[in-house]
Amino acid sequence: MNRRLTGRAATQPRRGLDHDEAAIYVGVTFATFDNMVNDGRLPKPVELDGENVWDLVLIDRAMDRLVGLRRSTL
């Protein structure tokens, strides 16, 4: 995704992240992020109107599994 958000749009909560935002969110380099997506540790993107978007909820679930957290059943 080549768009750059500026001003207010950049600070608004979003559920979908582009590649760079997703890697930064996870806290790894872009190359490490790509490796983690390719080997299945992190989710693949979904295509929305021709753009690859990573779902924040799916990233969170994958990270929970990676660090051994269990979701509450409450």
Image (spheres, grey):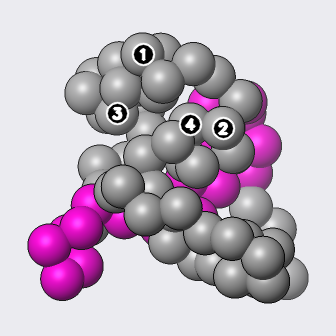
Determine whether the residue tagged by mark 3 lies in a helix, strand or loop: helix
Residue 9 sits in quarter:
bottom right
Query: Separation of disc 2 and disc 1 at Cα?
Result: 11 Å
Q: Where is residue 21 in the image (x, y as percent from the top left)?
A: 58, 49
Give whichever of 13, 72 is nearer the camera: 13
Q: What stretch is highlighted in magenta?
A: 47-70
Q: Is residue 45 left or right of residue 58?
A: left
Determine whether the residue tagged by mark 4 lies in a helix, strand or loop: helix
- Amino acid type indicated by mark 1: Ala
Query: Separation of disc 3 and disc 4 at Cα?
Result: 10 Å
Please give the residue where the numbered disc 1 appears in the rendered image: 31
Q: Position of residue 29 (x, y in %)?
A: 57, 19
Instruction: Tell whether label 4 touches label 3 (CB within 8 Å).
Output: no
Q: Residue at x 56, y 37 (%)?
A: 23
Instruction: Tell whether label 3 touches label 2 (CB within 8 Å).
Output: no
- Tag in front: 1 or 3: 1
Crowding around mark 4 (Cα neighbors within 10 Å: few <14, some 14 to 19, many 20+) is some
Give whichever of 2, 47 is nearer the camera: 2
Residue 2 sits in quarter:
bottom left
- Amino acid type indicated by mark 3: Val
Which circle's residue, 1 or 3, is located before the other in the chain? 1
Q: Residue at x 27, y 61 (%)?
A: 52
The answer to whether residue 15 is magenta is no
Q: Give the numbered dot on residue 23.
A: 4
Q: Is residue 41 left or right of residue 24?
A: left
Instruction: Tell whether label 4 touches label 2 (CB within 8 Å).
Output: yes
Query: Separation of disc 2 and disc 4 at Cα?
Result: 4 Å
- Amino acid type indicated by mark 2: Ile
Residue 27 sits in quarter:
top right
